[in-house]
Image (cartoon, helix red, strand yellow):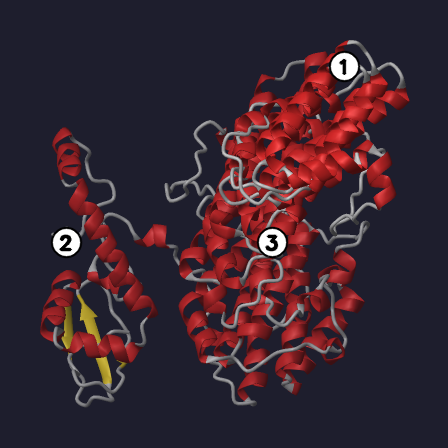
Amino acid sequence: MEKLTFYAVSAPEKLDRIGSYLAERLSRDVVRHRSGYVLIAMEALDQLLMACHSQSIKPFVESFLHMVAKLLESGEPKLQVLGTNSFVKFANIEEDTPSYHRRYDFFVSRFSAMCHSCHSDPEIRTEIRIAGIRGIQGVVRKTVNDELRATIWEPQHMDKIVPSLLFNMQKIEEVDSRTGPPPSPSAADKEENPAVLAENCFRELLGRATFGNMNNAVRPVFAHLDHHKLWDPNEFAVHCFKIIMYSIQAQYSHHVIQEILGHLDARKKDSPRVRAGIIQVLLEAVAIAAKGSIGPTVLEVFNTLLKHLRLSVEFEANDLQGGSVGSTNLNSSSKDNDEKIVQNAIIQTIGFFGSNLPDYQRSEIMMFIMGRVPVFGTSTHTLDISQLGDLGTRRIQIMLLRSLLMVTSGYKAKTIVTALPGSFLDPLLSPSLMEDYELRQLVLEVMHNLMDRHDNRAKLRGIRIIPDVADLKIKREKICRQDTSFMKKNGQQLYRHIYLGCKEEDNVQKNYELLYTSLALITIELANEDVVIDLIRLAIALQDSAIINEDNLPMFHRCGIMALVAAYLNFVSQMIAVPAFCQHVSKVIEIRTMEAPYFLPEHIFRDKCMLPKSLEKHDKNLYFLTNKIAESLGGSGYSVERLSVPYVPQVTDEDRLSRRKSIVDTVSIQVDILPNSIPSDDVVSNTEEITFEALKKAIDTSGTEEQEKEKRRLVIEKFQKAPFEEIAAQCESKANLLHDRLAQILELTIRPPPSPSGTLTITSGHAQYQSIPVYEMKFPDLCVY
């Protein structure tokens, strides 16, 4: 060998003839089963290959690879292992120039086949499999270092390499389920254990993947998991994708997530457990990707997950409708439970993904999800619910709100306007989301997540009479101008939601607890003196509604409202620290403790609480009195005039946007002075006769009617929410026109006051009004009140 090596190095042009001769001898010896001569020839080829690095080695390499192929084709395991070892040595040699004609298709196929060896002897089988894995590793290293490395990433090669590695990785008995990257295997394990060696090779393969060939390396993983039914249970699938996510370059993570989403779409009609397994894999991938680059797939992830959430609810609804008695019913029930597993997995994934996004992206996702919540009577949502029915629609509302709750968890906005913009708050507080107690709970919890910017909610958990609020160490800041503006604009909407939410018949204890927390959080985060007065008015109105009981609520709900009012007034009285107010509240609570404990939260929400037969006979000392509260707050400088005005829920936009509205409603003069018997050109009766001509006219003007409705909405919004001075300034130029219009509609006689600070007297043939105070303004002949 020394003489042969010296001769080959001295005369490299002879390498081609040397290789051809050795290849011919080795081929003959392989056929004749002369293993000793085969070993000698391969050792000679190996040593010559390692010693010579000239340009003339190219033809010699062809002879060498031809002989390796001969060994791999033989049926003897020893020769297969020998050929593999030679190929691995060759793969570790760095060539000076690339080979443009050499291909490794045969070696990929042969090594992949060796990875699936089924030899009867376990030791030999393991040896052949290890040789196959090492051969694949050699092919990967050789081609990646070659300028023609792109050929190895072609789908026909990846479809052989990746399943072969996964097949051997399945032999791992204990799958590492830790959240961090799995530890690197030791050198001894790599050589002796096919599973560890295959995993190491898989990591190396993925680590070398680039932008253009990432998908080709990942797709065979899905095919393998589908073929071997490894989505249920999905421990191995999760393990595989953890390896993938930790091995690839971070900027390519979104490619893997896109592939998982695409596979989820492809398997949307599979069993619920298979879909749940895929979603669980997506969760693990997202958990890793969220720490790095997620890429442009944020909205795509949520859109796909919400689509599959709708599909799951649809399947569940169809099974409930088509279920029958007997065994079919049992199967249907089992499938429903499986669908709930899918839904919970989707919600968990949405929540985890959303909670790891930056705030600016999270606010977009909140709007994205809210836009898909079905709201009856509107078509603003973008989720198809045509096949769901009422039960399915209710279910999808609950699922989407649960997703929204997960996304908003931990969200901290500097101003409440950022967290609760009008386009988000309006659908959230829609009447459609108040028809079920669970929906109302989710809506309130979402609001709590967005309002609680100082983590006070945990201190307020549970409705109770707090002896000393100072012990809670509540964190709060001075109310900023943006928050004050928000309450001026949207406060009535929040009060209305709380007021109507308290009066629902299907409320349970949790509803009252969440309503109490809502009032407390508004007090902490958003309340100035005006808001405090409004909240007290709201509490008194709730107390009056429980006493009068126009809605025929059960006694438990009436007592629950009374307990809620007591808990909140106790809280707010201590928060604003007005001694007289605190004294009145404490006195009422003390009397209730002695005479009517069912009016207190600690008693009414116990399992066995004695309820009264009626509330009409109770002493007024058991109630919080408006005059006492006004007297106590007035002495501390609060403007208490509004306390004498009973709280009435704000009329909703749906009520306002009727087909015709007069200017009176537009400027919020909410006095009904036009009886139906009085004809008017500007007022159309709600019971207008429906004829063919009327319908035809409505159809012809449908386009302009939409524009008119939008104009009316903008005008209403301006007059409701803009400052009075701004409205007055804008109206000054149109004072005469409005004066004539108002007089024409209401048939009023308007007598201007003698001075700008006097009073405006309005008289009509149909009604008599008291004098209305006029603010100082530049046009004394018009008052917008």
Left or right: 172 in relation to 693: right
Q: CA distance from mark 1 to mark 3?
A: 56 Å
- Give the mark, 2 or 1, whose residue is nearer the N terminus: 1
Quarter occupied by residue 239: top right
Q: Which residue is mark 2?
A: 682
Dot 3 falls on a residue whose secondary structure is loop
Taking the spot 21% from the left edge, 79% from the top edge, the residue there is: 729
| Amino acid on which the number 2 mark rests in the picture | Asp
Q: Are marks 3 and 2 in contact (CB under 8 Å)?
A: no
Q: Quadrant of the N terminus?
A: top right
Could you tell me if residue 107 is visible in this image?
no
* Residue 272: percent from left, percent from top: 64, 27
Residue at 71 percent across and 35 percent down: it is 48
Q: Which image quadrant for residue 536?
A: bottom right
In the picture shown, does residue 92 fall above or below 298? above
Q: Nearer the viewer, mark 2 or mark 1?
A: 1
Percent of width and height locating residue 672: 28, 59
Q: Is residue 377 left or right of residue 339?
A: left
Depth check: give the residue in front, 391 or 235: 235
- Residue corresponding to mark 1: 30
Q: Amino acid at mark 3?
A: Ala
Q: To which residue does mark 3 refer? A: 290
Q: Please state the horizontal and vertical placement of residue 14, each as a whole percent of the image.
A: 62, 31
Q: Residue at x 16, y 46 (%)?
A: 704
Measure how far apart labels 3 and 2 are at the Cα level: 60 Å
Which element carries disc 2, helix, strand or loop?
Answer: loop
| Res. 40 in view | yes
